[in-house]
Image (cartoon, grey):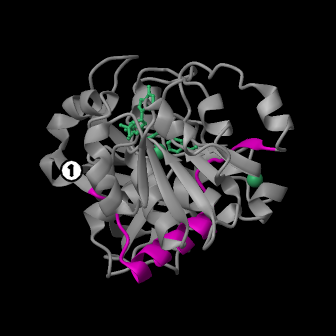
Amino acid sequence: MTQTIGYAALQQNAPLTPFSFERRELRATDVQIDILYCGVCHSDIHQSRNEWGGSVFPMVPGHEIVGKVSNIGEAVTTFKIGDKVGVGCLVDSCRTCPDCEDHLEQFCNKASFTYNSPEKVTGVNNYGGYSKQIVVNHEFVLRISDKLNLAETAPLLCAGITTYSPLKHWKIGKGDKVGIVGLGGLGHMGLKFAHAFGAHVVLFTTSPAKAEDAKRLGADEVVISSHAEDMQAQLGSFDFILNTVAAPHNLDDYTLLLKRDGILCLVGVPDHPHASPTVSHLIFKRRSIVGSLIGGLKETQEMLDFCAEHGISSDIELIPIQEINQAYQRILKSDVKYRFVIDLASLEL
Ligand code: NAP
Ligand code: ZN
Ligand code: ZN
């Protein structure tokens, strides 16, 4: 066991505070990582406030982890000490079910998530990346190219793959009109990827002040979602809309913007359900509402390599861990540009 330190919510809604704990003894197939940076996802807030139910405390959040390998188990041949690596939302899965065989470990019924989830072998609750160090099975560790800035890469491990994966799955590319709803951590990566894939991209936002940034990040058009006339002008015109909003809202506003056979893909997971969408809007144009969950390990590596090749990373605000509670408050006010990343050098053992 190695003693380490992190920041934890000791109970539901408690502010995060310093927390000492132990990481497991290295198993033969494990990689030990000194964490350098960890992104702050809205899911960290949902879970530390138990907004989805079933949260286990104390909770060390964080699943956008980058760092350097500090030790390897005796059976590990794919990583060496000093390698730059990442860990996202997944740290284990069963490896044998149809989802695992299809490289879609996120859907495995036995998937072990990076925090607030039992470890596969011992059943002990996992602690996440708001900490100095982590031990992870080598098959769940991602490789990071030297071309990428490490702090700006951290958010790719969740916000990046969560937006890359559905755009790829539904084959978004040149000639498609794509909407991105919400300009936060996920939304700003959605803009970058949809733009890189060649789509015509429209950002829907509740924050007029973000319009200029949205264009810089890849939007061809920006629509303020409270402006009814501007929303009307977009009716029936979209192939695909990726909705990243973390709060319940009226989905009809977006299903009506889809063409025949258009798809509204939900990735935001609000604490209370959305009101039921109007079914006739779906039936009459054969529109679909779908969901998507992060991405598997193979696709996450593909996304990281795509980002290295195309010079894509996250726009971040780097913070010392002591500012994490203020960062949560700003995220809740939609005031994030466009992902907070914790610099773990600020945390002393
Ligand atoms: P975020 O940084 O807080 O961004 C969410 C954005 O949604 C806000 O910046 C805001 O953008 C907009 N918004 C917020 N409240 C709104 C409201 N009441 N009505 C309309 N728009 C609103 O959050 P995030 O980290 O991107 O995460 C977004 C959601 O995705 C969370 O629910 C998170 O748990 C979930 N998530 C899902 C997955 C998955 O695998 N499916 C993975 C990661 C995260 P504007 O200011 O532009 O309106
Ligand atoms: Zn996340
Ligand atoms: Zn499985």
Asked whether mark 1 and ligand 1 are closer than 8 Å, the reply comes as no
When asked about the image quadrant of residue 300, the answer is bottom right
Closest to the observer, 147 or 198: 198
Would you say residue 141 is visible in this rendering?
no
When asked about the image quadrant of residue 152, the answer is bottom left
**Left or right side of 230 for 13:** left
Q: Where is residue 41 in the image (x, y as percent from the top left)?
A: 40, 42
Q: Position of residue 314 (x, y in %)?
A: 33, 60
**Is residue 336 shown above or below 190?**
above
Instruction: Tell me what residue is drawn at x 21 percent, y 50 percent.
Output: 317
Q: Is residue 292 within the magenta segment?
A: yes
Tag count: 1
Residue named by callout 1: 317
Q: Position of residue 129 (x, y in %)?
A: 36, 47
Closest to the observer, 207 or 304: 207
Helix or strand or loop: what does disc 1 sit on? Answer: strand
Magenta stretch? 287-315
Closest to the observer, 339 or 202: 202
Instruction: Tell me what residue is drawn at x 40 percent, y 74 percent.
Output: 144
Instruction: Tell me what residue is drawn at x 63 percent, y 57 percent.
Output: 166
**Left or right side of 327 for 247:** right
Identify the amino acid type marked 1.
Answer: Glu
